[in-house]
Image (cartoon, rainbow, N blue to C red):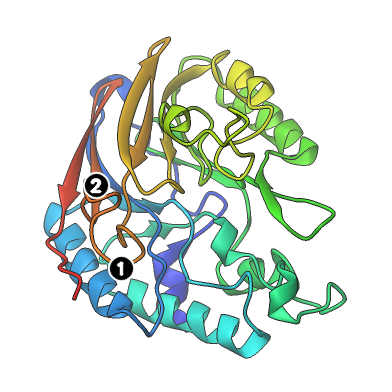
Amino acid sequence: MMRISRRIFVGGALAASAAPAASSRFTFVHVTDMHIQPEMRAADGCRQCFAAINKANPDFVVTGGDLISDALATPRQRALSLFSLYKDTVKRIDAPVHNILGNHDVFGLFLASGVSPSEPDYGKKMYEDQIGRRYYSFDHKGWHFVMLDSIGFTPERGYIGAIDDEQLEWLRQDLEKTGKQTPVVAVTHIPLSTGFGAWMVNAAGIVPPTLVVVRPKPVLELLHQYNIKAVLQGHTHICENLEYRGCQYITSGSVCGEWWKGPRLGIHQEGFGVLKVDGDSIRWSYHPYGFRAG
């Protein structure tokens, strides 16, 4: 357990370096949608991916949520065992790891789980107990990283993409303290901005609220008041890099591809993103790690 506490970092556990952003050079990894489970050779795939991440020698790693598969519709002991499997497996990453919450990391939300909302670790509480805070920030070598919770609940015990008002106010205060010169990277599970939504409209011509953050404009307008350089996203399991107003909106594929059945849509291979910072610029590349479903 002590080893986990050294590997999983939350809430500013990496201290800011005195080096200004203008002279910063470092590499970090964005790895998302691991969906670890005992079945489908998923744990083996994660281990293979983590070994490839170590070869990239990043300063740190940010995850993009959906660490496990699945807490939404499973009983308590199954969910706890999946979080335990993730924590044990992520120890293989040599660099510090900063996690965020994905929809599949929410415990007992679906009625099919048989879980009552009165259970003490219902919803996001199990994630917070097992992994860490649902939103926070940290600094590294003159750059500021904001880790967001993009999961909202519906009255029918479903989920949507959402940044709640409490978190938005926290973000406002966090960025105000950071200042307008510091380069900022935001990390979210459900995308704030994606071109993939055009491919995923339903019969009514609407992008489902489970696919993207609904009402993203207040968050986007706030981020763009500051020196936002990149928004790192997950959830869709596709590779995408959009640029708007000097900010890259990057979706770094997924570790599991089509949920451990091969590349997503037959196109997007299992992999992770490597980001290289040089001064106040950031460059992303996607790295398949060679998983073969079967």
* Label 2 crowd (10 A; few <14 / some 14-19 / many >=20): some
- Residue at image location 15% in from the left, 61% down from the top: 52
Mark linked to residue 260: 1
Above or below, 125 against 186 in this view is below
* Nearer to us in this view, 29 or 17: 29
Q: Residue at x 66, y 71 (%)?
A: 107
Mark 1 is surrounded, within 10 Å at the Cα level, by few (under 14), some (14 to 19) or many (20 or more) other residues, namely many
Quarter-of-image position of residue 292:
bottom left
Residue drawn at the location 18% of the way across and 70% of the way down: 48
Q: Count numbered badges in the picture.
A: 2
Q: Residue furthest top?
A: 245
Image position, residue 87 (x, y; %):
43, 76
**Residue placed most toward the observer, 217 or 7:** 217
N-terminal of the two: label 2 or label 1? 1
Instruction: Decide if residue 42 is on the left or right side of residue 64.
Output: left
Label 1 sits on a secondary structure element that is loop
The reply to whether residue 20 is visible in this rendering is no
Q: Quadrant of residue 51?
A: bottom left
Q: Amino acid at mark 1?
A: Trp
Residue 286's x, y, as percent? 20, 42
The three-letter amino acid code for the residue at tag 2 is His
Residue 144 visible in the picture: yes
Q: Regarding mark 2 in the picture, which secondary structure is present there?
A: loop
Q: Alpha carbon of mark 2 to alpha carbon of mark 1: how far?
A: 12 Å
**Residue that mark 2 sits on:** 268
Q: Which mark is residue 196?
A: none
Q: Position of residue 70 (x, y in %)?
A: 53, 72
What is the quadrant of the C terminus in the image? bottom left
